[in-house]
Image: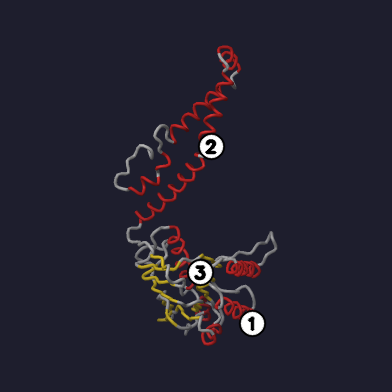
Amino acid sequence: MIEKFEFNESRNTSEFLEIFKAKNDGASDELKKLDRLIALVRLRENPIYRIIFNLILPFDFIVCKKLLTLISDIEHKLPEWLEKFQELECLISLANFSYLNPDYNFPEFETGNENTFEIKNCGHPLLTRGKKICNDFAFINSGTILITGSNMSGKSTFLKTVGINHCLANAGAPVNADHFRTSVFNLFTCIKVNDSVSDGISYFYAEVKRLKELIDEINNSRGRKIFFLIDEIFKGTNNKERLTGSREFIKYLSKQNCAGFISTHDLELVNLSQENFNVTNFHFREEIINNEMIFDYKIHAGPCPTTNALKIMEIAGLPV
C-alpha cells in the first residue's frame, strides 16, 4: 500500500517513504520473491518431491543459488526497510494521538536560551476532560523550583503533568497545554521509586541510588541540560537526616547545569531560597470550609502557608 499510494498532498511523506519504492522491484516485490524461494525450499522436506525435483533438474543447486543471490541483494536493504517502517509506525501513533486530541497543541522549542520552560493551561492527558485542573507556570534562567504543600493538594500530579507533557513534546507529539515552550532538556525523574524484598533494597536506599543516577547524568550530560522531577525527596528516612540530606542535595543541584522541580513536606527547606538565588519557592494549598478540605490544585508562588495532616487524621477519626 505504501509503494502504490500517491502522496500528492504531502511531499515530505512521499520523500520519507521513497526507500520502499524502486524503478524495477520495490520492497514488497523483493520480499515476495524471498517468500516464494522459501516455499520452494520447504518442498525439500517432502522426500517424494525432493527426489522427483532433483531427478529432473539440479533443484537444490538452483534454489540455493537464487536464494543466495536474493539475500545478497536485500541484506543491506532489509534493515533499512524495517527501521523506516518502525519509524512510520511511531509517526502513525503520534498522528493518531494528535487526531484524537484536537484541543492539544504542538510545543515550541527554545534554542537561544538553554534554561526556558513556559506552560499555559497545562493538564495531565490521563485526567478526565472537563474535570482536570490545568496550571500555568514559567521560569527563565531559574534552576531549582522547590514545591511545598499539604497532602493531596496536587504536588505529585503537577510533577507528573510536567513530565508526561515533556515526554510528548520530545517525541514530537502535541501536548495537553494551550502553550508549551521549553529548551531542549534531557528529562530525569525520581517520582515512583520502589523497594525490593528479593534484592534487599529498602525504599530509602532505592531513592538514594536513583538520585545518585541523577548526579551521574549531570556529570555525563556533555553539555545537554538535565531537567529533573523529584517527588518527596528523601521521604523514606527520619526527619532530621532527611532535612540535612535534602538541604545539601538541593544546594548541589542549584550549582549544576540542570533545572527542575522538587516537591517536599519539609517546610524548613524553603529558607534555601534566601541563601541561594537559584532556588525558588512555589506551593499548593487548601482551604477548610465547614470541616471539609477544598483544594484548588493551582500552583502559587512562595512557600506553603498551611498544613493539613492533623486535620486529615481528625476527619478520619484518629485521636489527635
Pick the quarter of the image with the N terminus: top left
The residue where tag 2 is placed is 75
Q: Compare residues 30 and 133 and report the one nearer the observer.
A: 30
* Residue 58 in the image: above or below residue 297: above
| Percent coordinates x, y for residue 41 in the rendering | 56, 24
Q: Give, as a three-letter code, the residue at label 2.
A: Glu
Furthest residue toward right:
200
Q: Secondary structure at mark 2?
A: loop
Kindly report the distance in space between the C-alpha atoms of the residues bearing marks 1 and 2: 62 Å
Q: Secondary structure at mark 1?
A: helix
The residue where tag 3 is placed is 227
Question: How dense is the environment of label 2, judged by Cα within 10 Å: few (below 14), some, or many (20 and up)?
Answer: few
| Percent coordinates x, y for residue 254 in the rendering | 55, 78
In the rendered structure, which disc, 1 or 3, sits on the residue that comes first in sequence? 3
Which residue lies at the image location 40% right of the left edge and 47% below the top edge?
A: 16
The residue where tag 1 is placed is 240
Q: Are marks 1 and 2 in contact (CB under 8 Å)?
A: no
Furthest residue toward front:
23
Which residue lies at the image location 42% right of the left edge and 65% below the top edge?
A: 124
Q: Compare residues 101 and 187 and report the one nearer the observer.
A: 187
Pick the quarter of the image with the C terminus: bottom right
Residue 211, located in which quarter of the rendered image?
A: bottom right
Q: Give, as a three-letter code, the residue at label 3.
A: Phe
Q: Are marks 1 and 3 in contact (CB under 8 Å)?
A: no
Q: Secondary structure at mark 3?
A: strand
- Report the side of 12 relative to 168 (left or right): left
Kindly report the distance in space between the C-alpha atoms of the residues bearing marks 1 and 3: 28 Å
Q: Compare residues 128 and 183 and report the one nearer the observer.
A: 183
* Residue 15 in the image: above or below residue 234: above
Q: Give, as a three-letter code, the residue at label 1.
A: Lys
Kindly report the distance in space between the C-alpha atoms of the residues bearing marks 2 and 3: 41 Å
